[in-house]
Image (spheres, rainbow, N blue to C red):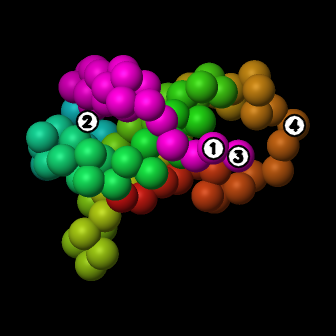
């Protein structure tokens, strides 16, 4: 299975993530989008996982920063479980991505 996005898909996803980041500053009060975006652009393979969350009806957003590892933590912040993921077992890796 192909696990990378085209440059156009990356750009579109980054726009969506930035908009969500700006609309929900309460989730990441002390974080700056410029730093998050730089980390994503340096680790484009992580965009695939975030895109999969988005594609299946989720709303990935930054919820924290791990100072020990230097990673930003993304959770799926949709209000309810997306339709395509209901009746499935919880999988921490499917709901969290670190970059």
Residue 1 tag number? 3
- Residue 85, image x and y in percent? 76, 33
Residue at image mark 2 = 26
Assess disc 4: are there few (<14), some (14-19) or many (≥20) residues with their C-alpha within 10 Å of its C-alpha.
Answer: few
Q: Mark 3 or mark 4, which is nearer the start of the sequence?
A: 3
Give the mark toward the camera: 1 or 4.
1
Assess disc 1: are there few (<14), some (14-19) or many (≥20) residues with their C-alpha within 10 Å of its C-alpha.
Answer: few
Mark 3 touching mark 2, by CB under 8 A?
no
Residue at image mark 1 = 2
Q: Mark 1 or mark 2, which is nearer the start of the sequence?
A: 1
Write down the quadrant of residue 47 in the picture. top left
The stretch of residues the image draws in magenta is 1-23
Give the mark toward the camera: 3 or 2.
3
Q: Is residue 81 left or right of residue 51?
A: right
Work out whether residue 4 can be spotted. yes
Residue at image mark 4 = 87
């Amino acid at each position: 299975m192909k696990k990378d996005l085209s440059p156009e898909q990356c750009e579109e996803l980054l726009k969506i993530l930035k908009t969500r980041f700006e609309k929900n500053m309460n989730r990441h009060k002390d974080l700056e989008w410029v730093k998050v975006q730089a980390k994503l652009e340096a680790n484009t393979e992580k965009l695939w996982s975030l895109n999969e969350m988005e594609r299946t009806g989720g709303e990935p957003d930054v919820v924290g920063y791990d100072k020990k590892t230097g990673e930003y933590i993304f959770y799926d912040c949709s209000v309810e479980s997306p339709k395509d993921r209901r009746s499935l077992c919880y999988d921490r890796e499917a709901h969290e991505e670190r970059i």
